[in-house]
Image (spheres, grey):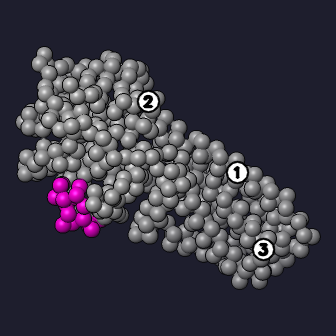
Amino acid sequence: MQPSALTLNRLTVGFGRRHVLRDVSLTLRAGERVALLGPNGAGKTTLLRTLATLQPPLGGQATVGGADVVQRKRGARRHVGFVGHTPHLIGHLTARENLAFLASLYGLSNTGARVSEALSVVGLDEIANRRARELSRGQLQRLSLAAAGLHHPAVLLLDEPDASLDRDAVRELPAMLDALCPGSAVLLSTHDPDVAARAAGRSVLVDQGRVIEPDTPGTAAPEPPVTTGATNVSFATTAWTLLRKDALVEWRAREQAPALLAFTLLITVLFDMAFVILAQADAPAVAAGVAWSTLLLVASLSGVRLFGSERDANTLTCLRLAPIDQSAVFVAKYLLLAAHVLVVGLVQLALLSALLDLQLFQGGMLATLGLVTIALSAVAAMQSALALESRAREVLMPLLAVPLAIPVMLAGVGATLETLQGAPAGGAAPWLGLLAVVAAVFLALSVLLYPHAVDG
């Protein structure tokens, strides 16, 4: 008898007070394939998402590869591959880059060969260098299968894998699973009994929140038990991998930087024109107000899309499924946001130096810019993460960020005036210290809170 890859014991799942699944018990052995049949709304998708650690259960127990999906969520993710209704692929990366990115998150060895093999199995090797956003729906489904099976999971969860596939691909599905995940237990949902008969050894019915099994159990596939290829990846390596991905996507999409730079130029000129008389009398005060007000607006605007764009594209699911420290996701996003804000800040100083005839590129101002960037980016990144599930995040973000940024603005203005008005050496130190403390507090809180914001 082969060991159990998946065990459910009286699992109950719901949303609030509404129970979608009640007292579900089910066992899959290594290599066994089971199809979930049932009408729409029966709970098939909810069950698969719960086993993939995307939906917390209300009660009962579920273990995947020996790891509890609630108590050892990160460990369970090493043993799970998941294909949902919507592909969670990164549109601006090629098919090969998508798989290579996932291989890095899962700590896979011999990445190049494994990626090439997976692409060949699903029939995408000839278009491996095309971006995911350019692929057809059927090709995306094939790529999703390759991504889910890349790390040889103990359990492969497939939510209607035949959706969007042509007839030839549906016929090839069992062979694809054999080649991608030999020995993996497979739990798939489908509305087509023919697909269930072809791809699974037995079927169970999901109806009105219950799982009904036939009296005769199916047989396991002859392959040996699978050992997942996923290994632990360090926090620093994970953050660096995510940052490189985000930077590459930003470079190809060009959604943030050009708009932010144009905004900076426009707002600086407008502020300078509005305060032209005051600027002649007190240029340092105008420089301080314009510089840090603009930077706050930039951080807020850029922060709105920080996590929201990932969620809207469903690629945040890709990151949630990976067996990584989710705080590394926040750190990577934060670093990219800080880079945006810093570049805009440098451009801002150059513009204000020319418009106000001030020498802003000096040690004190650059130190202030660095600390303001760290602090404002921390505030904006934290608000973006916490407002992730809000439909009104574009409105809420600036409203929530501005009050928290008040200490940053006061300290930034104070340090700027001390520097530009020729204060004695060390005069700006208290303001810089305040900036450092605010930045440290918000960064620490964000890193600690982010996993709870995305995983509940």
In what quadrant of the picture does the N terminus appear?
top left
Sequence-first disc among 2 and 3:
2
How far from the left and from the top, in percent, is residue 190? 17, 36
Judge whether 74 appears above or below 205 on screen.
Answer: below
User: Label 2: how many residues lie within 10 Å, few (<14), some (14-19) or many (20+)?
Assistant: some
Please report the bounds of the magenta region as a residue range: 116-131
Asked if labels 3 and 2 touch by Cβ distance under 8 angstroms, the answer is no
The answer to whether residue 397 is seen in the rendering is no
Marks 1/2: CA distance?
Answer: 31 Å
Mark number, residue 440: 1
Kindly indicate the quadrant of the structure image that contains residue 294. Answer: bottom right
Q: Which mark is residue 70?
A: 2
Q: Is residue 115 magenta?
A: no
Q: CA distance from mark 2 to mark 3?
A: 50 Å
Which residue lies at the image location 75% right of the left edge and 51% below the top edge? 437
Height in image: 198 above or below 217?
below
Which residue was labeled with disc 3?
A: 363
